[in-house]
Amino acid sequence: MTGASAEQAARQPPAPARTAGDVMEAALSTVKPDDHVAAAAYLMKHARASALVIVDDEESRRPLGLITEADIVRAVADGRDVNETRIRDLMTARPTVITAGTSVRDAAESMIAGHFRHLPVVDDGGLIGIVDIRDVCRALLDPPLE
């Protein structure tokens, strides 16, 4: 770098921190606690999702829980019938949630502290998206272009 361009680069403010709203998956499928696990697996496959948020109803979309691929794999390995087992029997209740304004770094710290790979994103109106560990890693490894 020449002296002038190095000086210009040094004067530029750092790129703004990415937020959960920047990296979240907004279009997500949800399920109800009384749905069967086979329905969750079907939705995950077709939505190419590794987790689904369990909501109380479609209007409030308040997150009640989370079901992941790992939950379903454990149930199958334990010999449970996915057509009979209900989501409420496998879900993680009261998941940690974040807002769209949460920094990606804070989301990563929450994931590490809680030993989980998915965070529902909420606002005053309820569920608006989900962030998974891949989204967080990608954002931390590839800073935004100016």
Image (tube, rainbow, N blue to C red):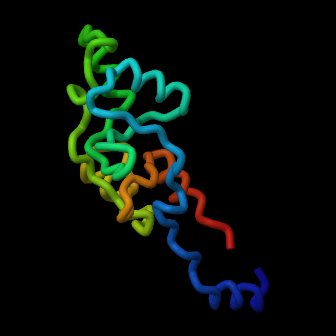
Q: Is residue 75 above or below residue 81?
A: below
Q: Specify the quadrant that holds the N terminus.
A: bottom right
Of the pair 96 and 61, the residue shown nearer to us: 61
Residue 14 lies in quadrant: bottom right
Locate residue 58 relative to residue 34 in the image: left or right. Answer: right
Of the pair 71 and 85, the residue shown nearer to us: 85
Q: What residue is rendered at 38% in x and 50% in y?
A: 59
Residue 33 coordinates in the image, percent (x, y): 27, 32
Residue 118 lies in quadrant: top left
Residue 129 coordinates in the image, percent (x, y): 45, 51
Q: What residue is rendered at 51% in x and 25% in y?
A: 45
Locate residue 26 relative to residue 68 in the image: left or right. Answer: right
Q: Is residue 142 above or below residue 15?
A: above
Q: What residue is rendered at 21% in x and 41% in y?
A: 93
Residue 73 coordinates in the image, percent (x, y): 34, 20
Q: Specify the quadrant that holds the C terminus.
A: bottom right
Count of numbered labels shown in the rendering: 0
Residue 83 lies in quadrant: top left
Q: Is residue 95 above or below residue 29?
A: below
Residue 27 coordinates in the image, percent (x, y): 53, 46
